[in-house]
Amino acid sequence: MKTLARFIQTKRDELGLTQKGLALAANVPVDIIEEVEDGKELFLPVTVRQALAKVLKCDPMEIKQLEKDISSNIISPEIIESLKNLILNGAGGLKCPKCGAPLVTRIAKMYDLEDNLILHPKAHCTKCPFQIHS
């Protein structure tokens, strides 16, 4: 079975790029590349998908077909939004709404086309496949 992690890593290896090299070439934070290849990030923002596809010399749809939006079918949008707000406000010790295990959280810093800083709350469960992406 082909996974997003395996696809990105294989394409990157074929081009002789390191994770840092891919991040620099695509102008995305290296931690995004690491999380994708570790299987922790399963859904990418459109801009990241397009940037990776350009560097990896593939169609963005090849990447999109491998993405999985795990949280959307499991937890209500209100709970997801509440968790995102808690993450952005620095709350710690958050628990997975699906299984109750600890959530690993972070805030990704990205910039829009006009160089405005945009903060994206991210989280993934330490036990089940639940994750929050923006």
Image (cartoon, rainbow, N blue to C red):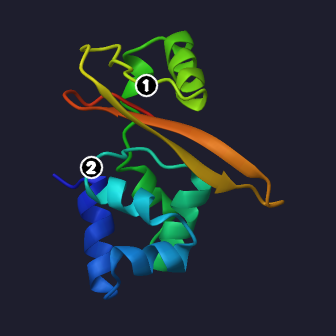
Mark 1 sits on what residue? Answer: 92
Position in image of residue 13 (x %, y %): 27, 80
Q: 20 and 16: which one is in front?
A: 20
Q: 99 and 49: which one is in front?
A: 99
Answer with mark 1 or mark 2, whichever residue precedes in sequence: 2
Q: Amino acid at mark 1?
A: Gly
Q: Amino acid at mark 2?
A: Gly
Which numbered marker is on residue 39?
Answer: 2
Q: Is residue 115 above or below residue 91?
A: below
Q: Is residue 101 above or below residue 120?
A: above
Position in image of residue 100 (x %, y %): 26, 13
Q: Residue at x 21, y 55 (%)?
A: 2
> Badge 2: how crowded within 10 Å, few (<14), some, or many (20+)?
some
- In this rendering, position of residue 117 left or right of residue 84: right
- Tell me the SS state at disc 2: loop
Can you name the residue that lies furthest to the left here? 1
